[in-house]
Amino acid sequence: MSTFTIFLALIVIVAFLLVVVIMVQNPKGGGLSSSFGGGGTQQLGGVKKTTDFLDKSTWYLATLLLALILLSNVAINRGAESADSKALDLDATTSQPLPTPAKTTNETAPVQTPAE
């Protein structure tokens, strides 16, 4: 398994976890984060601690996702070819044949003299 495939799998997993963490949050304090523990006021850790955990985990997962995306660029297999442009390389050979010149005939156009 290549390194890029491992990075790709990690990116998908982190992105899925980030979506789940964001969907659990509710900006008004309700949602799934307040229903943990049966909905009572004496919850384990309380609603405030749950939202703090979800907020921090959102930032950590987003940072991890960005870092994985940037690091995956290093792992891309580019093959043996260089990424340099060959547009200005004078020694590069072209693989296309040069166009053949059009056939010319021996006929010449009549010469026009200026009118007096």
Image: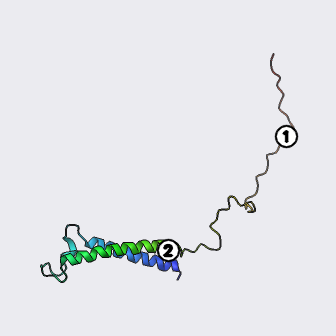
Marks 2 and 1, how far apart at CA: 61 Å
Residue 74 in the image: x percent, y percent? 53, 74
Figure quadrant of the C terminus: top right
- State the count of labels: 2
Disc 1 designates what residue?
A: 105
Inspect the image, locate mark 2, and give the three-letter code of the amino acid beneath it: Ser
Give 110 or 91, whichever is nearer the viewer. 91
Give 96 or 116, whichever is nearer the viewer. 116
What residue is drawn where x is 82% and y is 45%? 103
Residue lying farthest to the left in this orientation: 41
Task: Tell me if 66 is positioned left or right of 83 in this view.
Answer: left
What residue is drawn where x is 32% and y is 73%? 58
Q: Is residue 88 above or below residue 78?
A: above
SS for dot 2 = helix
Q: Is residue 91 above or below residue 14?
A: above
Disc 2 designates what residue?
A: 72
Observer-side mark, 2 or 1, equals 2
- Label 2 CA crowd tier, 10 Å (few <14, some 14–19, many 20+): some
What residue is drawn where x is 83% and y is 42%? 104
Q: Is residue 77 above or below residue 105?
A: below
Inspect the image, locate mark 1, and give the three-letter code of the amino acid beneath it: Thr
Residue 30 in the image: x percent, y percent? 18, 70
- Confirm or deny contact between disc 2 and disc 1 (CB under 8 A): no
Residue 114 in the image: x percent, y percent? 81, 21
Residue lying farthest to the top in this orientation: 116
What residue is drawn where x is 30% and y is 75%? 56
Residue 89 in the image: x percent, y percent? 71, 61
Quadrant assignment, res 14? bottom left
- Label 1 CA crowd tier, 10 Å (few <14, some 14–19, many 20+): few
Dot label at residue 1: none
Task: Tell me if 47 is positioned left or right of 67 in this view.
Answer: left
SS for dot 1 = loop
